[in-house]
Image: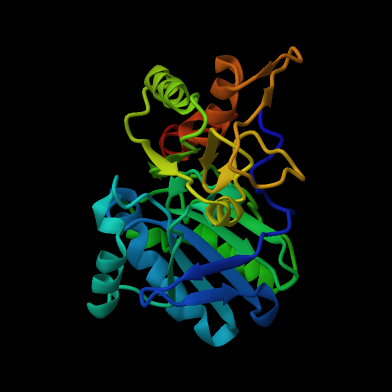
Amino acid sequence: MSERTRLGVGDAAPVIDLTDTDGQRVGVDPAVSNATVLVFTSNGCPYALAWHDRIQDVVRDYAEQGVSVVQVICNDDQLQPLDSAENMDARVQRGEVAGVFLRDGDQSTTRLFGATATPETFVIDRQGVVRYHGAPDRDYDDPGLRAEWLREGIEAVLESRNPAQASTPPAGCSVKWRVELLWWAGCPSHDRAEELIREQLADMHREDVRVERIEVTSAAQAAAYDFPGSPTIRIGGTDLFPQPGATPALACRAYTREDGQISPLPSRAELDGRMREALVRPWELPNWVDFRKQAATS
């Protein structure tokens, strides 16, 4: 399995530097706000749309208290066309979005936070530490709840205390991921690598994941992609089999399997573990509960 873990309460948030609807880079620095809210969302997910107005009310209600709310479109836009830059801009032009609206085109920020759902929210304090993580409130069908879990997380940060409920299960549509296969024509293993990826996705019943082949043809490209050799498999801009210190090169890649054997490809078992961890959906997380049903029966 991958060594990375999902971001949780008490963890330091990674740097946020994404593009807006004009294609301009926008950095988000928690140190300049009394609280920062990050919402991974979608223009097409029905759960995100159901909670959308509540999120916009949060933006407006806390603006004068120095709270920055950043909404991030995180889906692959070939899988969810409504999440394209053009459709993002159209929503802005219609006045549907308050606050900062950014796009995680390579899905790297989504991966670093470990977000699995749209919408999924994080409240970050001035020191850059996550203080609340989870759903906006307990029921997407009840506007009267007014994103109460999210608001409590913000209030707690503003009052320098811990939220009454610091973590709740993420709920909504699963993030629509893209698997990138980076390859070089001088190495013959890339076709088999694609077969392994597609076989793995089929076993996982993940028709909602797209495989994108990226041919690396020059040393400059290899450096730009931090490409350690062919084939390389990435999700959210992160190499599933990182090799710290490896020099980017147009070369065949060597994988050291769990039994110590050197191979041009990872084993199917290793690929299975790392893809399942990277592509996990909210309801597949350990100890996940459907709080909406739980509330109905409690």
How far across and down, in percent of the image, does residue 27 sit? 57, 74
Looking at the rendering, which quadrant does residue 194 occupy?
top left
Q: Is residue 251 left or right of residue 213?
A: right
Q: Left of 157 or right of it: where is 61?
A: left
Task: Give residue 271's position: percent from left, percent from top.
Answer: 56, 23
Residue 185 appears in view: yes
Placement of the N terminus among the 4 image quadrants: top right
Q: Quadrant of residue 241?
A: top right
Q: In the rendered image of this protein, does residue 81 appear above or below residue 2?
A: below
Looking at the image, which residue is at 47% across and 47% down? 217
* Residue beneath the point at 59% across and 66% down: 16
Image quadrant assignment for residue 129:
bottom right
Colour style of the rendered protein structure: rainbow
Q: Nearer the viewer, residue 201 or 46?
A: 201
Q: Please, is residue 70 above or below residue 274 in the view? A: below
Residue 183 in the image, given as x and y percentages of width and height = 49, 37
Identify the residue at image location x=47%, y=32%.
283
Q: Position of residue 225 (x, y in %)?
A: 56, 52
Q: Is residue 33 above or below residue 263?
A: below
Q: Residue at x 64, y 41 (%)?
A: 228
